[in-house]
Image (cartoon, rainbow, N blue to C red):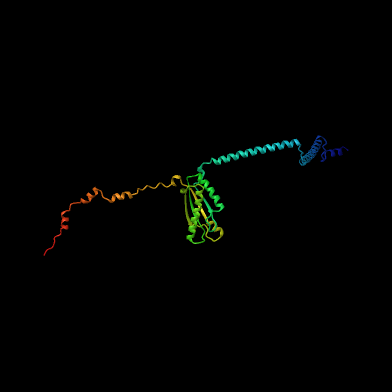
């Protein structure tokens, strides 16, 4: 019997551990389950709060409406201040900011020299600029399409240029600041026979350039004194002139010889 008991106690089977370690493992597992359940409950609660509509009280609505109204008023005041600042800045823009060269095209109808409504509006805007900047001159170039003879188109281009010039003069632009020429069909931009191309060629081109007032006014022509009154005086010689006419160089010996040729005798 003693031998069997010793064999059992020294066998390979490990004894079961029953003590504080088992209790700690069970406690940690239970705590993990509790945390998971708590997290799920918190997630469900937050989801329900997000989907629940919030009812604002009348007092809160009035306060929010008043705040929005004040914000709109402040925004409008800021916009008005910015607009006034912008307009004053545009008015105070120095004249030097205008480009030295401006180009504008005024278009015409087929075979017509009269201005269209759009052309009058364009010329009115250019006249305002020219009245503000008196050191600018205008070169008006009349153009036509390729329909008709070259001589007819030359004349038509000049008529269109003169109409534009007259419109600017009527608007207050001095005539000495404007020069009008005609290119007729020689200055065409398009060469095909389409309506779009022909419309592009029927134009008056304005070249507005900064020249300077002193370079646009011709100097006064020199005054010439009429010589009609002096001619009557010059026609009758004076006493000094008559004496000088009577007085002449004395004939030399050679002159007397040539004057008194010997007469041949028998």
What percent of the width, then of the height, locates residue 197? 54, 58
Q: Is residue 186 left or right of residue 67?
A: left
What percent of the width, then of the height, locates residue 244? 22, 49
Q: Is residue 247 above or below residue 75?
A: below
Residue 186 appears in the figure: no
Residue 8 appears in the figure: yes
Quadrant location of the N terminus in the rendered image: top right
For the point 54% across and 48% down, the residue is: 124
What percent of the width, then of the height, locates residue 150? 48, 60
- On the image, which quarter does residue 63 sit in? top right
Q: Is residue 150 above or below residue 60?
A: below
Quadrant location of the C terminus in the rendered image: bottom left
Q: Is residue 266 above or below residue 114?
A: below
Near-viewer residue (128 or 191) = 128
What percent of the width, then of the height, locates residue 64? 72, 37
For the point 21% across and 51% down, the residue is: 246
């Amino acid at each position: 019997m003693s031998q069997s008991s010793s064999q059992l106690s020294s066998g390979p089977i490990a004894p079961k551990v029953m003590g504080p370690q088992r209790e700690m493992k069970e406690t940690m597992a239970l705590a993990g389950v509790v945390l998971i359940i708590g997290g799920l409950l918190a997630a469900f609660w937050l989801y329900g709060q997000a989907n629940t509509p919030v009812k604002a009280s009348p007092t809160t609505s009035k306060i929010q409406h008043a705040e929005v109204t004040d914000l709109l008023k402040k925004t409008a005041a800021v916009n008005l201040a910015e607009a006034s600042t912008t307009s004053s800045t545009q008015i105070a823009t120095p004249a030097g900011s205008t480009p030295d060269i401006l180009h504008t095209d005024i278009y015409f109808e087929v075979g017509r020299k009269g201005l269209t409504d759009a052309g009058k509006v364009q010329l009115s805007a250019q006249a305002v600029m020219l009245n503000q900047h008196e050191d600018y001159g205008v070169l008006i170039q009349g153009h036509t399409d390729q329909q008709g003879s070259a001589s007819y188109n030359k004349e038509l281009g000049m008529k269109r240029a003169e109409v534009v010039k007259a419109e600017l003069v009527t608007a207050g632009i001095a005539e000495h600041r404007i020069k009008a020429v005609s290119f007729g069909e020689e200055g065409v931009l398009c060469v095909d026979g389409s309506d779009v191309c022909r419309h592009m060629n029927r134009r008056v081109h304005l070249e507005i350039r900064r020249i300077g007032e002193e370079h646009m006014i011709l100097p006064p022509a020199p005054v010439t004194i009429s010589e009609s009154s002096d001619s009557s005086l010059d026609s009758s010689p004076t006493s000094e002139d008559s004496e000088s006419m009577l007085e002449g160089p004395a004939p030399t010996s050679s002159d007397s010889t040539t004057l008194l040729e010997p007469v041949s005798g028998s």
